[in-house]
Image (cartoon, rainbow, N blue to C red):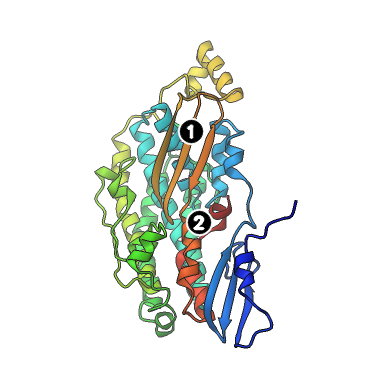
Amino acid sequence: MQQVNRLKPFYENLVFDRDDNTMVINFGPQHPSAHGQLRLILELDGELVTKAIPDVGYLHRGMEKMAENMIYNEFLPTTDRMDYVAASANNYAFAVGVEKLIGAEVPRRAQVIRTILLELNRIISHLFWLATHALDVGAMSVFLFCFREREFAMDLMEDYCGARLTHSAVRIGGVPLDLPDGWLERLDAFLDKFPNDIKDYEALLDKNRIWKMRLEDVGVLSPEMAKSWGCSGIMLRGSGIQWDIRKEEPYELYNELEFDIPISDTCDSYGRYKLYMEEMKQCVRIIKQLIPMYKDTNKQIMAEMPEYISSSKEQMMTQNYSLMQHFTLVTQGMKPPIGEVYVPTESPKGELGFYINSIGEAYPYRLKVRAPSFYHTGILQDLLPGHYLADVVTIIGSTNIVFGEVDR
């Protein structure tokens, strides 16, 4: 059977013995500024991009098919490997989808811990974005400063769950651990210092003429284009559209918290950069409100649903039925009721949602991930033409894509 080349229609229009002055080059998939395994086929007229085709699939691991052959709890650590810069956001998005499927009510203390972890995770992800984006454009000092603060935030994550990158810090029905002694105090100390660090980044970049020349009026994304491509997160809010799932469809404790959704109407890379800075400030504001909430909760951190979720360790050690049920759930898996759900969440990169279809078995019949980076990669074919080759690096960095969740 003859293999079909999915890029053939593009190549048919590219004649290599040309009369004009254009040429075709590959940008990636090994380019250091491709932010992963992105291959861009660029048609250039001199240094001006006239056509761009994103080619993905170099990191494809078949995660959605893997999920259909794993019990629900078994698949949760695999979600870490999608957006590996923001692992807890993936853990949570999958867990909340399963919780909706089984009708679980998560205890309030677990909700507080999960919301803290999600916002701390957002800070870690945004710092990583700013560091690598600044390095791409040529700002070395910002890279070092951002990684310094990111290490402090990752220390907090490690103190909680034992991991720094792939956290598995959320469980279906709650969280695996309560906060360790002194953790909130260390978190509060980090939050007191962090706003001054953000001011340092802004002092280095906001009025830096090289930074502004490289970002202003580059990668202009109109509101119409953003909506037609299904953009979300800062890519959407950077085009003047105020849409954040934490406000529009609140989950966990976001409906009890006061925070703003910053937007930018410049529609360019500089406007999106400013939104990342503002969002980190809002993360600090959110977590500050959550710290006193934690102290007003009881110690329960997992939902009580023996048919779906294991009992506490104390119950398993003292009650024979709880131990038997735990053994069944670990070896055979839970069996959610027949049905299908889709639950969207606001990950650091945009709308992350899991569609789960259950036929009452221990394995999902169908699982599909709605990952923001996939849409933000596709838009490059409309966003890059008309820019110069040097701007390609800036625009790719501005989209904040990660290929763990593009290829899946």
Tag 2 residue: 374
Could you give the CA–CA distance between mark 1 and mark 2, rounded to whole angstroms? Answer: 21 Å
Q: Residue at x 33, y 60 (%)?
A: 281
Q: Residue 188, can we see it? A: yes
Callout 1: SS: strand
Residue 146 x %, y %: 47, 66
Q: Residue at x 46, y 33 (%)?
A: 172
Residue 377 x %, y %: 50, 62
Residue 367 x %, y %: 52, 38
Q: Residue 194, can we see it? A: no
Residue lying at the far top of the rendered structure: 320
Q: Residue 357's mark? A: 1
Q: Residue at x 54, y 32 (%)?
A: 365
Tell me: 186 left or right of 75: left
Q: Residues within 10 Å of mark 2 (few under 14, many from 20)?
A: many
Q: Residue at x 62, y 45 (%)?
A: 62
Between 375 and 211, the one nearer to me in the picture: 375
Between 5 and 145, the one nearer to me in the picture: 5
Pointers 1 and 2 in contact (C-beta within 8 Å): no
Tell me: 79 left or right of 262: right
Q: Residues within 10 Å of mark 1 (few under 14, many from 20)?
A: many
Mark 1 residue type: Asn
Mark 2 residue type: Phe
Residue 85 x %, y %: 52, 55
Location of residue 147 with respect to 169 vertically, above or below? below
- Closer to the N terminus: mark 1 or mark 2? 1
